[in-house]
Amino acid sequence: MKLSYHYLMLLNQSAFQKQVYEHLEHLDMSIGQPKILDFLLDEDGCIQKKIAIGCQIEPASVTSILAKMEKEEYVRREQEGGNRRSLYVYLTPKGKEAAYEVRRVMEEIEEKALKELSKEERELLLTLLKKANKGLLGSMFAGQ
């Protein structure tokens, strides 16, 4: 079997996601929740559209994931400045705690995945992945 870019990316994503959910099993999170919690650690108080773009999740799916997360008290959604079209999403204290745990788990698995790489190889890998993502996602990754 040829280990092509697409095959290696799919394999890596599947293995990474499986390990994340295994480590977070006690939180009983559904698909998309860890990614959104991790995103909100850096972008707390953003609009749902930005979450959809940043997490590469369809806007309708983000709406349903956030509704569940709001019910589970991980996030709260608020209108600001009388703008009824945009809801801003904030982590609750429970959400921040879960988000920090998600980040810790992701960093732990990332370290496991990259343990055989030198610092220079890690930097090169990130540079190359950013270029590949820019090719797929366009300007979203420009300048990063």
Image (cartoon, grey):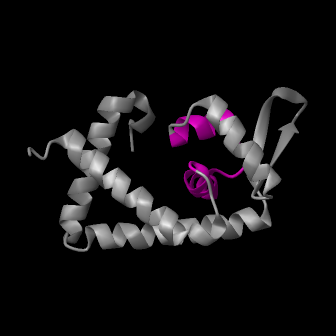
Residue 47 showing in the rendered view: no
The region drawn magenta spans: 31-55
Residue 38: quarter of image: bottom right
Instruction: From this view, report whether residue 12 is shown above or below residue 4.
Output: below
Q: Main secondary structure of the magenta part?
A: helix
Q: Residue furthest top?
A: 85
| x then y, percent, for residue 20 | 47, 64
Instruction: From this view, report whether residue 128 is shown above or below residue 95.
Output: above
Q: Residue furthest right?
A: 82
Q: Residue furthest left?
A: 2
Residue in view at x 75 percent, y 58 percent: 74
Residue in view at x 85 percent, y 42 percent: 78
Classify residue 111 as left or right of residue 20: left
The answer to if 44 sits in the magenta stretch is yes
Q: Foreground: 19 or 63?
A: 19
Q: Foreground: 73 or 96?
A: 73
Residue in view at x 64 percent, y 63 percent: 28
